[in-house]
Image (spheres, grey):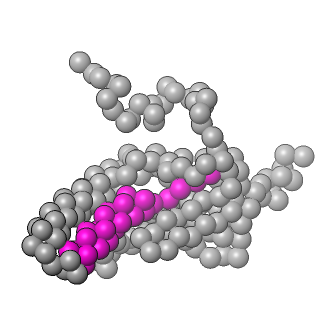
Amino acid sequence: MPLPFLTADRAFDATDDVALPFDDHDQWRRPYRPGPWRVGAAALALLLASFVLLAAVIVAAAGATPGAAVTFGLAALIIAAALRTLRVGVWVSRHGVRRVGFLANTTVAWGQVAEVRTAQQPVRWLGLPRTVQGQALILVRQGGERITLLTDHNADFLSRVEAFDRAADTVEAWNAEYGVVAPVAAAATR
């Protein structure tokens, strides 16, 4: 017996082409769900943080206030890192596309985007230095700078090819809707 109200996939069903009433294109949104590798890593980090918090309580109960403060601070850092791990990814809005990294963000307005396309190329496996052959969603700026937005071997899409294709198509659709119309295409419509 399918229980669609329990799944997060129903927001991506092909039959639901109607925009939802709360669908605000001015807010930044991730066009895909975080993958199991990313969620699992964050869950393990939060589990570690709970043990560190327990240790901090024990240290505080023992009377070592400076040690307890350091341990609470370490737990806070682990929790912040876990939450940041969940935030990493590509976000889109009417204003542009944003690639959120663990330490830095890159935001490109749709007016500065020359093209968004999928390419077959060597990609990093789970963000590690090891590269494998895979697909990447590449954003090319007006000046020619290339930014890799998504890969099919990152923490969101490893072993989820359909999810990568759906996310790449969604980002390309946002570019088609809010991006600058190419001069050749504009001349052809006249």
Whether the magenta-drawn stretch holds residue 172 is answered as no
Left or right of residue 105: residue 111? right
Whether the magenta-drawn stretch holds residue 70 is answered as yes
Is 143 or 6 nearer to us in this picture?
6
Residue at 49% of width from left, 25% of height from top?
15
Left or right of residue 126: residue 179? right
Region rendered in magenta: 68-93
Q: Is residue 63 above or below residue 35?
A: below
Is 143 or 79 nearer to us in this picture?
79
Query: Residue lying furthest front in this view?
Result: 63
Q: Quadrant of the N terminus?
A: top left
Horizontal and vertical percent position of residue 97: 60, 59
Query: Residue lying furthest right in this view?
Result: 190
Can residue 134 be seen from the camera position used here? no
- Magenta highlight: main SS: helix
Q: Quadrant of residue 39?
A: bottom left
Horizontal and vertical percent position of residue 162: 38, 46
Residue at 50% of width from left, 48% of height from top?
31
